[in-house]
C-alpha cells in the first residue's frame, strides 16, 4: 500500500523564560496510507457534509442541482413560489397544492420543526418542497419531529441548497413551469426534461384526489389559546353544508367558532341531497387545480345558488364565477403567500391576506348584477364577488389564514349575517 509522508515543524516556547522570543524548534514526521479505490468511495460517503444528490429539471431546459431530504425518487409537478415567512407546515398540508412543487422564498425553513396541531388536512398533497436552507436544528416548545423526518414518513420529496431567488425570478419572468425532481442518478437530464414537457396540470381534475369519500360532521372550534376575536358571534346555530374540494381545517374551525353546525360532503355530492338537508347556508371550499376541469362541480353550484345563502372561498369563488356565466383564466404565476394586499371596494379598507391560487375570475365576463367587492392591489385581479339577489358572496383568498394574517376573518361574520337575513325573510 502506498503512503504519503508529512513533516511538520513546530516551535515550543518555555513560559518560564524571561525572553519569550526564544523558542526551540522540533520536527514531527508521520506517514498516512493512501486508501484503495473502495476505501476512497467510503471516505467520500462518510464526509460530515451532504453532497448534491438531486436535480430539479424545469421545462425551459434549466437544471438545478441540490441536496435532498425527505423522500427519494422522481416526481413531476408545477413549480410555484410562496412568499410566506412562516407557516410551512400549514402550506405542506394545504390540499390546494396538489400537483405542485412549492418553493419557499423565505430562505430558512425547518427551524421550528413540525407538530400535529398545525396540520390543515389529513395528509400532505403537494408534489415536493424546494427551499434554500434546511435548518440543522429545531427550537420550538410545540415541536414533535423534524421537517425532514416528517416529509420522509409521508413520502414527500424535498431539496435544499438551491438558488431559490434565481428560480423565483425565472418563474416571475416566464410564468409557472412544470418541473421534475429526481434523486435517481440513473435517469439522464434528457429523460427528466422529456418528463417535464410531456406533463401538464391544466385541465386535470385534482379535486377528486383530495376530497373526502363520505359526509361527516365537524364540531371542533378554534382552540381558546389561539382565539383572537369574538366579533360577529351569537347564540344562534346555523346549519352549514361545506363542499370539500380540498377544504382546509381552519375554515371549518372558524365556521364552528362563529356558531355553525357543519356537515362536510364530498365534491361529487349531489345538489339535490344537499338541499334535502335543509341547510341555512352552503360553503364551497378551496381546492387545487383548474376550475374548468371539474364541470360536475360547476353544475352542482348552479343548482344550489339562489336557493340558500352561499359562500365561496378560493376554488369555490372560481366555481361560483363560472356558475354565474363568467370565465376563469390561468394566471402567469398565481398568488401564493401570506402578504397580499386586497382592497375591499365597499368600505375602501385594505386587508393583508393569505392567498394560494393559479386561476382567477375574469370580471368582464360576469353578467349584470354581479358585484366585484374586492381587488388584489398587486395586479388588480378580482378578489371577491357578491350577488345580493342570489344571497351569494365569495373571496379569492383565504379569510381563515392559517398561515397568514387575520384581517379577513370578519368575512365569516358576513356569511353569518347573510344566513340570518335569509332566515328572517323566510
Image (cartoon, rainbow, N blue to C red):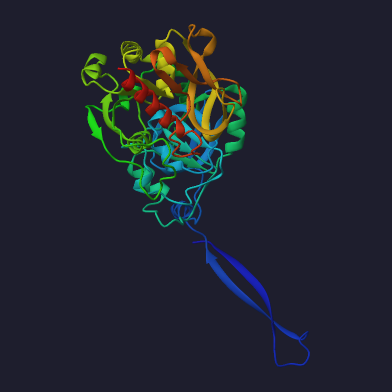
Residue at image coords 46%, 33%: 410
Residue closest to the eye, 358 or 218: 218
| Camera sees residue 212 | yes
Looking at the rendered image, the quarter that the C terminus falls into is top left
Q: Is residue 307 left or right of residue 407?
A: left
Residue at image coords 57%, 22%: 345
Please, which residue is most extreme toward the front here? 424
Q: Is residue 124 left or right of residue 200?
A: left
- Please identify the quarter of the rendering in which residue 274 is found: top left
Residue closest to the eye, 107 or 35: 107
> x%, y% of residue 347?
56, 26
- Please identify the quarter of the rendering in which residue 94 is found: top left
Asked if 402 appears above or below 297 in the picture, the reply is below
Q: Is residue 86 left or right of residue 304?
A: right
- Please identify the quarter of the rendering in which residue 3 is found: bottom right
Residue at image coords 55%, 40%: 162
Residue closest to the eye, 173 or 221: 221
> x%, y% of residue 350?
58, 31
Asked if 325 appears above or below 146 in the picture, the reply is above
Residue at image coords 77%, 86%: 22
Amino acid at each position: 500500500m502506498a503512503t504519503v509522508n508529512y513533516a511538520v515543524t513546530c516551535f515550543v516556547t518555555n513560559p518560564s523564560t524571561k525572553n519569550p522570543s526564544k523558542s526551540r524548534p522540533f520536527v514531527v514526521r508521520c506517514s498516512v496510507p493512501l486508501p484503495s479505490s473502495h476505501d476512497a468511495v467510503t471516505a467520500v460517503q462518510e464526509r460530515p457534509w451532504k453532497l448534491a444528490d438531486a436535480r430539479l429539471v424545469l421545462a425551459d431546459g434549466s437544471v438545478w442541482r441540490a441536496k435532498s431530504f425527505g423522500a427519494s425518487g422522481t416526481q413531476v409537478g408545477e413549480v410555484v413560489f410562496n412568499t410566506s415567512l412562516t407557516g410551512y407546515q400549514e402550506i405542506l398540508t394545504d390540499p390546494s397544492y396538489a400537483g405542485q412543487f412549492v418553493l419557499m422564498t423565505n430562505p430558512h425553513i425547518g427551524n421550528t420543526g413540525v407538530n400535529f396541531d398545525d396540520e390543515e388536512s389529513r395528509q400532505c398533497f403537494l408534489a415536493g418542497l424546494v427551499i434554500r436552507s434546511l435548518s440543522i436544528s429545531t427550537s420550538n416548545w410545540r415541536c414533535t419531529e423534524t421537517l425532514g423526518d416528517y416529509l420522509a414518513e409521508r413520502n414527500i420529496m424535498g431539496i435544499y441548497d438551491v438558488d431559490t431567488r434565481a428560480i423565483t425570478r425565472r418563474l416571475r419572468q416566464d410564468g409557472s413551469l412544470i418541473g421534475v425532481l429526481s434523486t435517481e442518478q440513473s435517469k439522464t437530464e434528457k429523460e427528466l426534461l422529456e418528463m417535464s414537457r410531456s406533463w401538464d396540470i391544466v385541465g386535470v381534475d385534482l379535486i377528486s384526489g383530495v376530497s373526502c369519500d363520505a359526509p361527516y360532521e365537524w364540531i371542533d372550534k378554534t382552540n381558546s389559546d389561539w382565539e383572537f376575536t369574538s366579533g360577529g358571534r351569537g347564540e344562534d346555530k346555523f346549519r352549514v353544508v361545506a363542499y370539500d374540494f380540498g377544504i382546509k381545517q381552519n375554515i371549518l374551525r372558524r365556521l364552528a367558532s362563529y356558531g355553525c353546525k357543519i356537515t362536510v360532503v364530498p365534491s361529487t355530492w349531489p345538489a339535490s341531497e344537499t338541499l334535502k338537508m335543509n341547510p341555512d347556508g352552503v360553503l364551497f371550499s378551496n381546492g387545487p387545480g383548474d376550475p374548468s376541469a371539474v364541470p360536475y362541480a360547476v353544475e352542482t353550484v348552479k343548482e344550489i345558488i339562489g336557493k340558500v345563502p352561499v359562500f365561496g372561498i378560493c376554488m369555490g369563488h372560481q366555481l361560483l364565477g363560472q356558475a354565474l356565466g363568467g370565465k376563469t383564466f390561468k394566471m402567469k404565476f398565481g398568488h401564493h403567500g401570506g402578504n397580499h394586499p386586497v382592497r375591499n371596494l365597499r368600505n375602501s379598507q385594505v386587508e393583508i391576506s393569505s392567498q394560494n391560487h393559479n386561476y382567477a375570475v375574469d370580471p368582464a365576463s360576469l353578467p349584470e348584477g354581479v358585484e366585484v367587492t374586492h381587488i388584489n392591489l398587486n395586479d388588480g385581479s378580482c378578489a371577491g364577488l357578491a350577488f345580493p339577489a342570489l344571497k351569494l358572496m365569495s373571496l379569492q383568498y383565504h379569510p381563515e389564514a392559517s398561515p397568514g394574517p387575520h384581517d379577513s376573518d370578519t368575512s365569516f361574520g358576513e356569511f353569518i349575517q347573510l344566513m340570518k337575513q335569509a332566515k328572517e325573510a323566510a
